[in-house]
Image (cartoon, rainbow, N blue to C red):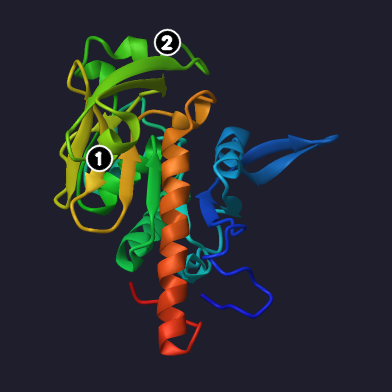
């Protein structure tokens, strides 16, 4: 990460970790204008800022994974279905995807994992994480789960999911044994990729969280914690990890007398 003497060191108590967030690229409106725009739901931005981070938005055009060298963490946000071509499956009639966004999110996710950059993957993001590592998805959850209607009660209407976490997991550390969250499940994880482990499930078996098995901090959740304004524990925990990552990076730079690269 490039640096100069005017920047606040990560070890400074006033340092706000820079958190990159993926974005949508679709119709938006502002003032009297309506056009294609790079946008992100405000709940994600608000959650990062409230947890002490500085949001940095990454449009799904001009993808350059090198930008991750300039941030302290990555959040892959929710959105449309992941294209089944990404995991070698035939398309379900109800699957709706944006292949260009898939390419962008997959590239950033893989680059974050390679760098050891803290990664928080939400809803579609958790699916991207699984696919990036070789896993597959259930394209239409109601096809295999008779309880699925509770997870997506209606268009634009969040359901609620209750889940149990696995002992020793990041989810258990941050949320305790059980928790609940707003959700909007259409697709879900099917075959979990090698390198991931399931760390939370709903009572009906739906995978609600996965984590990488290595030492680097990565967490994917199928639910929508950004929509639960009363429970900021996951965002607080993620931003704290991003701050520690920045501190370790700066300590490495200082020890080696340079600030232009970081090897975790």
Q: Residue furthest front?
A: 13
Residue sitting at x 37%, y 56%: 109
Query: Which quarter shows the C terminus?
Result: bottom left
> Who is closer to the viewer here, 95 or 154?
154
Tell me the residue at 19%/18% (across/down). 144
Q: Secondary structure at mark 1?
A: strand
Is the residue 180 above or below the residue 25 in the image?
Answer: above
Rendered image: mark on residue 210 = 1
10 Å crowding of disc 1: few (<14), some (14-19), many (20+): many
**Which of the labelled discs sits on residue 218, or is there none?**
none
Q: Which residue is mark 2?
A: 153
Disc on the earlier residue, 1 or 2: 2
Who is closer to the viewer here, 196 or 80?
A: 196
Residue 237 % position (x, y): 41, 43
Could you classify mark 2 by the number of other residues whose Cα lies within 10 Å: few (under 14), some (14-19), or many (20 or more)? some
Vertically, is 216 above or below 91?
below
């Amino acid at each position: 990460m490039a640096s100069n003497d005017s920047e606040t060191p990560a070890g400074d108590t006033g340092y706000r970790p820079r958190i990159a967030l993926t974005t949508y690229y679709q119709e938006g409106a502002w003032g009297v204008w309506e056009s294609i725009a790079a946008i992100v739901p405000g709940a994600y931005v608000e959650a990062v800022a409230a947890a002490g981070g500085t949001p940095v938005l990454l449009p799904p055009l001009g993808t350059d994974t090198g930008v991750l060298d300039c941030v302290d963490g990555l959040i892959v946000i929710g959105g449309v279905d992941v294209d089944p071509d990404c995991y070698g499956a035939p398309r379900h009639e109800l699957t709706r995807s944006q292949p260009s966004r898939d390419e962008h999110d997959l590239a950033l996710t893989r680059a974050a994992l390679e760098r050891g950059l803290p990664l928080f993957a939400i809803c579609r993001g958790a699916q991207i994480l699984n696919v990036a590592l070789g896993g597959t998805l259930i394209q239409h959850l109601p096809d295999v789960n008779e309880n699925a209607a509770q997870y997506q009660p209606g268009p634009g209407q969040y359901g609620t999911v209750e889940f149990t976490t696995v002992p020793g997991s990041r989810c258990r550390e941050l949320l305790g044994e059980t928790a609940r969250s707003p959700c909007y499940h259409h697709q879900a994880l099917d075959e979990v990729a090698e390198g991931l482990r399931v760390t939370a499930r709903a009572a009906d078996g739906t995978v609600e969280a996965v984590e990488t098995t290595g030492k680097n901090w990565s967490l994917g959740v199928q639910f929508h914690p950004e929509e639960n304004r009363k429970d900021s524990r996951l965002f607080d925990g993620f931003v704290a990890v991003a701050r520690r990552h920045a501190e370790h990076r700066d300590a490495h730079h200082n020890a080696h007398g340079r600030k232009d690269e970081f090897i975790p």
